[in-house]
Image (cartoon, rainbow, N blue to C red):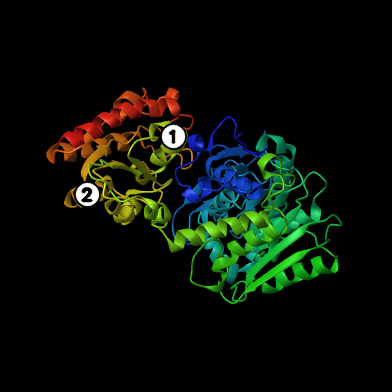
Amino acid sequence: MLCFIKPSKYPVGQVSPDDLSYKIFYRKKPFPLMQFRLVWLLLLMTTCSFGQTKVIRLYDNKAPGSETWNWAEQSDDSQIANTKIVYNVVEPTLTVFPAQGINTGTAVIIAPGGALAFLSINSEGNEVAQWLSKKGVTAFVLTYRVAHTIDPIKVLKAVASSPAKFDSLVSPIIPLAMNDGLSAVAHVRKNAAMYAINPNRIGLMGFSAGGGVTMSVAYNANAESRPDFIAPIYAWDKNIVGNRVPSHKMLAFIAVASDDELKLTSTSIDIYTKWITAKQSASLHIYQSGGHGFGMKKQDKASDGWIDQFGDWLGANGLLWPEQPTGLLKGVTYGMYKKYLQAQEEAQRMDWANRNRYAGDNALVAPLKAGEQRIVFMGNSITEFWLRTDSSFFTGKPYINRGISGQTTSQMLVRFRDDVIALKPKVVVILAGINDIAENTGPISLESVLGNIVSMAELAKTNGIRVVLSSVLPAYDFPWRPGLQPAEKVVKLNRLLKAYADTNKLVYVDYYTPMVDARKGLQAAYTQDGVHPTLPGYKVMEPLVEKAIADALAR
């Protein structure tokens, strides 16, 4: 299933998320067909999601083989593995991390490590899943059964001090953990439609003991429980069941560090050799440093980039793009899209504040005529889309639109001299702040947002430009960054803006009051995405801003 927005129903200016750059949506010349498709792909990547994480029990009843277990699952944030762990797992589960952006149709089940005594649930589980989810992959973190322990630290010590004792503790768990892995793959494949994934693009990734589970599943699976690709990461050989490479195609990504304390480099090499000998496709990555259990940890070691290489491997094997793209995706490859994103990132790096966006247009602005009362509208996408949505409002008037989609007040302040002061307007209308609340350029306090807007106002006044400060429009949530709860922040920022305007005798235009709904969001009659006004919304704003401009000119 693809999250798809029909252009005919949702004009670009009405549904585009605020964190997309102007280059994605507006040009003097039309986009070529392929480039236009890429525009919409980025829109889809930013706005579409498939809900929040949820936990699924792997078995309807007691897990087979451990029906008599009566202890409770526990978690620990101690320094056992320098990350959160889960132990004494009785009921195996899958935590679902839905694909964000374009759903590639690919799924990856992740089995954390922990010597079958616990599960390194964050570094080798949740953090990996979050990374994959952002790539459009539906990720599942598997909590499989492990040995019953009072103190997992003692179990770890037993690995070195008494291997025989340790083996006796975990040996009964090995088949149970393998069965949990088999059941996980079978569950995901059976419910592929519900998870909106391709049943032939299911991968199994495991770390350390989870890598052993991964290999056991690969060696013992049937058609329902067989993964289509595997990723054993520093796989632990102590719990691998079987050694027969499957005859069906099964891609393999294998990673380990040379300085692995458990000396598992040879295990990874052995897996790679078996795969190549069986004429299966495999990729082996042996890092100079990283130790055992590097997972998603950043240690300034060679292994730190393994997840990016795994992503490149997925992309090279077609797993980061829909198998049969349709609609606007049709004809666009992952390679084309990746190059497009790289170009956008480079443009952002070279011109963070987008000062060059209007450089050509500013050069063409005619010299100010005697008595001309030029007005500049300074803002983000709400200002930029205003011109596109209701061009008649700007036609025949001395109005200059200098909105840039996605911008925060920090970026606007940098380009204020180029896009406002240099044009010598009589009045500047400043509408800004919502993207700061959305953290488009990172977290920022409302006081700092106010400070940026005050700096723009002070620059304008120093240069003889009168100021109209605009309230921020209501917003209950952001489609491109859900969960930030912006409603009350908007109220507070507007209160700060109005207080500053009143104290400094500036005109304040209140869009918020006539457009807010009962939830302190934007009224549905005025928006389609909860943030950007539609034409009816702009029609509410236009008489208000024109009155504010007239008031500023009269002062």
| x 58%, y 71%: residue | 160
| x 55%, y 53%: residue | 131
89 to the left or right of 172: left
**Residue 430 locus on image (x, y percent):** 29, 42
Q: Tell which of 100 and 129 is nearer to you.
A: 100
**Residue 215 locus on image (x, y percent):** 73, 59
Q: Against 165, is 23 above or below?
A: above
Q: Residues within 10 Å of mark 1 (few under 14, many from 20)?
A: few
Q: Amino acid at mark 2?
A: Ala
Q: What residue does disc 2 label?
A: 460
* Image disc number at residue 227: none
Q: Amino acid at mark 1?
A: Ser
| x 61%, y 41%: residue | 91
**Foreground: disc 2 or disc 1:** 1
For the C terminus, the quadrant is: top left
* SS at badge 2: helix
300 to the left or right of 254: left
Q: Looking at this rendering, what residue extends furthest in the front direction?
A: 370
Q: Tell which of 456 and 205 is nearer to you.
A: 456
Q: Is residue 50 at least partly visible in the picture?
A: yes
- Real-space Cα separation, disc 2 to disc 1, in angstroms: 26 Å
398 to the left or right of 151: left
Q: What residue does disc 1 label?
A: 391
The quadrant holding residue 432 is: top left
**Residue 522 locus on image (x, y percent):** 39, 28
352 to the left or right of 320: left
The quadrant holding residue 271 is: bottom right
